[in-house]
């Protein structure tokens, strides 16, 4: 809360002269300079009132003497000894922020549920709050699945794939304000998978990758069902990321007498994992971290080159956003689909393609999910 009026005094926003606007009816006007008021001036050094024909020189951030109702910028004045000639008219209130105009004493400035960014921190500092009560970072378990997946440091066999999802998720989790807890890679085998899921359910949220598609060894849903999980959805009309699964499961952590833990089964393709985290997991993570619900933020840009695409799914395709100010342009990067990390690394955003459009012409506006 504001611990005093902000600003605590009528504040000059310019270097110049504090004036009574009525004195400037006829221009140029010559006024008597009776004081100089600096930022931080001692109250006893500020004139108690400006009389008719009087002015005080004043600096940016200094308190405006009472009697004055405007500040003239120094650029529109010239000084002749202890007199100042003013060449510009003013309207009452010009270049003054009235006492309490930004916030009156006692006004609530920050409410629970706000993520502390630089503005919130500046606001807290401005009202003398050097300590704030915050939520702890939620612990987000990451469980990657797949018999073909090996650790980054291992030498992969000819048909093995290095684990990249755990590490991309760790970056996204940290950026979203969570604390990643990386579990060992789970094989496509129900017992071992269940043990690792149980471990993951001890965190505040469990993110699994892989094993949620229609393949014979996609066991994640089956194992969770056996564990008594509740599913809220088991797919989304999007690409990449169509098989994404969201639910809640409590059976996994018998030692922990706690309510059910939310989980996501994110598809294993690396870009599907990244996109579904942004669209679905990030908002849940924010909620677990005490934030109030907020919509995702999209930018808008004009499409650089026509695209043709199959309808039916809303697509989030790696793209390059360029241009500045009102000239933002977006262009898809060529890619081999949702496993193509290299192509996505050349992109800097995801272009959002509506589900019902077969062609989108060059020059049309597209929503863009920044990365
Ligand atoms: P899945 O969703 O299990 O069918 O996997 C889809 C694709 O993603 C397969 O080509 C997997 O090899 C690949 N994949 C699954 N998990 C990972 C991972 N942790 N890192 C990199 N690629 C993965
Ligand atoms: Mg798999």
Image (tube, grey):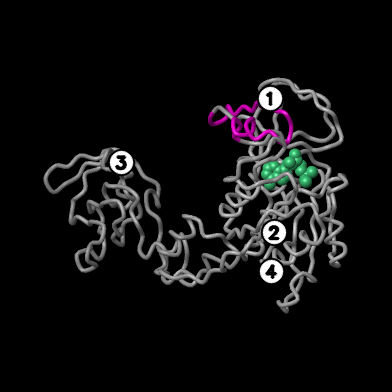
Identified at 61% across, 41% down, the residue is 155
Give the residues in magenta. Answer: 324-348
N-term mark: 3 or 1:
3
Tell me if 307 is positioned left or right of 34 in this view: right
Q: Is label 2's Cβ within 8 Å of ligand 1?
A: no
Binning the other alpha carbons within 10 Å of mark 3 as few (below 14), some (14 to 19) or many (20 upward) gives few
Residue annotated with mark 3: 26
Query: Element at badge 4?
Result: loop
Instruction: Relative to 3, say whether 94 is above or below.
Output: above
Of residues 289 and 294, the one drawn nearer to the viewer in this rendering = 289
Tag in front: 4 or 3: 4
Mark 4 and mark 2: span between their CA atoms?
16 Å
Q: Position of residue 208 (x, y in %)?
A: 73, 54
- Say if the magenta span includes residue 80: no
Q: For the residues carrying marks 3 and 2, which lies nearer the camera in this image?
A: 2
Quadrant for residue 256, please give it: bottom right
Residue behind mark 2: 284
Q: Residue at x 57, y 68 (%)?
A: 135
Label 4 to label 3: alpha-carbon separation: 77 Å
Residue topped by disc 1: 334
Q: Is residue 289 left or right of residue 264?
A: left
Residue 263 pos. (x, y %): 75, 60
- CB atoms at circles 3 and 2 under 8 Å apart? no
């Amino acid at each position: 809360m504001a611990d005093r009026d902000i600003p605590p005094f009528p504040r000059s926003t310019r270097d110049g002269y504090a004036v009574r606007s009525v004195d400037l009816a006829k221009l140029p006007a010559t006024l008597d300079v009776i004081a100089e008021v600096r930022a931080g001036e001692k109250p006893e050094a500020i004139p108690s009132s400006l009389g008719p024909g009087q002015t005080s020189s004043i600096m940016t951030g200094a308190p405006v003497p009472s009697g004055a109702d405007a500040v003239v910028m120094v650029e529109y004045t010239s000084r002749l000894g202890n007199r100042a000639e003013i060449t510009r008219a003013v309207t009452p209130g010009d270049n003054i922020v009235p006492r309490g105009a930004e916030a009156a004493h006692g006004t609530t400035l920050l409410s629970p549920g706000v993520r502390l960014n630089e503005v919130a921190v500046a606001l807290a500092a401005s009202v003398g709050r050097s300590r704030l009560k915050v939520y702890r970072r939620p612990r987000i378990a990451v469980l990657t699945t797949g018999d073909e997946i090996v650790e980054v440091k291992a030498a992969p066999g000819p048909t093995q794939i290095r684990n990249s999802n755990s590490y991309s998720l760790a970056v996204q989790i940290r950026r979203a304000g969570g604390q990643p807890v990386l579990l060992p890679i789970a094989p496509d085998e129900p017992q071992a998978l269940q043990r690792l899921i149980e471990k993951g359910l001890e965190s505040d949220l469990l993110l699994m990758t892989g094993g949620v598609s229609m393949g014979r060894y996609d066991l994640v849903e089956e194992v969770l069902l056996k564990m008594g999980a509740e599913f809220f959805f088991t797919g989304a009309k999007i690409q990449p990321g169509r098989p994404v699964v969201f639910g809640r499961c409590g059976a996994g952590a018998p030692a922990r007498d706690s309510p059910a833990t939310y989980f996501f089964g994110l598809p294993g393709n690396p870009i599907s994992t990244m996109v579904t985290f942004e669209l679905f997991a990030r908002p849940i993570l924010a909620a677990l971290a005490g934030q109030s619900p907020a919509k995702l933020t999209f930018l808008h840009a004009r499409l650089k080159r026509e695209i043709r695409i199959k309808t039916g799914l809303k697509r989030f395709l790696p793209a390059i956003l360029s241009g500045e100010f009102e000239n933002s342009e977006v262009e898809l990067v060529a890619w081999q689909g949702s496993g193509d990390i290299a192509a996505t690394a050349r992109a800097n955003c995801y272009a959002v393609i509506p589900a019902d459009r077969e062609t989108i012409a060059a020059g049309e506006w597209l929503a863009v999910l920044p990365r």
